[in-house]
Amino acid sequence: MPNRTRPRPAAAAKPAVEPFVLNGLKVRAGERRTVDLPVTDLSTHTPMTMPVQVVHGRRPGPRLFVCAALHGDEIVGVEIIRRLLRLSALDRLAGTLVAVPIVNVFGFVALSRYLPDRRDLNRSFPGSARGSLAGRLANLFLSEIVAKATHGIDLHTGAVHRPNYPQIRVHFDDAEALRMAEAFGVPLVVNAGFRDGSLRLAAAERQVPVIVYEAGEALRFDEAAIRAGVRGIVQVMRTIGMLRGGKTKGRRLDPILARSSSWERAPISGILRAGVALGARVEAGDWLGVVSDPFGESDVDVQAREGGVIIGRTNLPVVHEGDALFHIVRVEGTQATAEALDAFEPELDYQQGLTSELSDEPPVV
Ligand SMILES: [Zn+2]
């Protein structure tokens, strides 16, 4: 028989988790709730809202926001968040997950990167309640989502016809964000300065570390980018103490930290025959492709001015002189780079199912 007279400090000391309040609605500990944040009315008189799902854990912990479609046509992150929210591990969450699958609700329904006022939402932070439509949306997101968070993950893709190899962008001077970036588990972490008007800068100014995940292209789904994204968020949540469990299965190496990148551009207008894939390692002087006229009478090679890894490229063969063709990130340590990329390759091949421990979702093909 246990000694009943002894006090049981563990039970007594358990802190009560306060409700999470969003738009005046209380989400109690252990609850999950969808909240429609009012944005404005459409010109049709129809109300427009930003849908948010809050998963408020029974145990105290960090408050992480995960958002997508800040650029309305970047839809890979929308699917990442849908899969994330279906994971049974969230039943045992410590802290709070605030999921915002579609931030730029206007651009999303219009299949556009921008807002109806033609502004780029990710250049409109911090915005203000009396500013432009973009500024008001930015202000709403800052005051309702970022201000209540301790950490953030912002999901993006490349532009239309311009896919990105899965990568994290982060400011290397932000130690907590860099810790999240390294936990995410994609092989390339790229140093990215703070761009004026970006969510990442506005959040950093409020002491909320945010990492940007870039993978895939606009208006397309990409199974590998989706799986690496779900897995990455789970690994960040484990690292900052929101989910239990160690690293996910599979060989995992430290990511390559890359400080700079540049684009190789079309030397002439014409038709591109690309010769290197996303994720390819290239040396300075390597042949990347060739641009020619439709008769095949003039061929101009595209070469890498510097070595590195192809982290973005065009999929559109029709090019004008100066168009961005291949985005090369400079990396040091050829051997370490090769190992990190090779270790990640099976994850890109979803049929090998390395990520299946997280989800039994059938792949999008
Ligand atoms: Zn974007």
Image: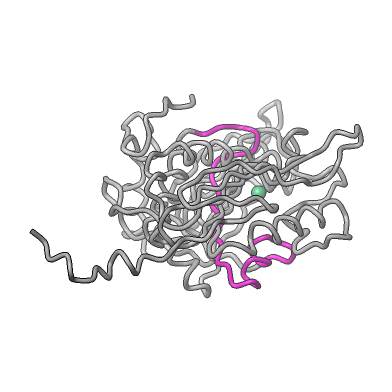
Q: Is residue 334 visible?
A: yes
Residue 207 magenta-drawn?
yes
Relative to residue 321, is residue 290 drawn left or right? left
Rendering quarter of residue 127: bottom right
> Residue at left 52%, top 57%?
64
Q: Position of residue 145 (x, y in %)?
A: 64, 57
> Residue at left 28%, top 54%?
246
Eyeballing the image, is 200 above or below 39? Answer: below
> Residue at left 50%, top 51%?
56
Q: Position of residue 29 (x, y in %)?
A: 48, 52
Could you tell me which quadrant the N terminus lies in?
bottom left
Identify the magenta region. 195-222
Q: Position of residue 321 (x, y in %)?
A: 74, 45
Toward the viewer: 307 or 1? 1
Eyeballing the image, is 299 above or below 302? Answer: above
Toward the viewer: 160 or 130? 130
Relative to residue 353, is residue 90 drawn left or right? right
Toward the viewer: 185 or 312? 185
Q: Is residue 266 visible?
A: no
Eyeballing the image, is 78 above or below 254? Answer: above
Seen as rendered, the residue at the extreme left is 1
Which colouring convention does the figure follow? one colour
Seen as rendered, the residue at the extreme front is 5
Residue 234 magenta-drawn?
no
> Residue at left 62%, top 37%?
75
Q: Position of residue 254 (x, y in %)?
A: 34, 60
Relative to residue 96, is residue 140 drawn left or right? right
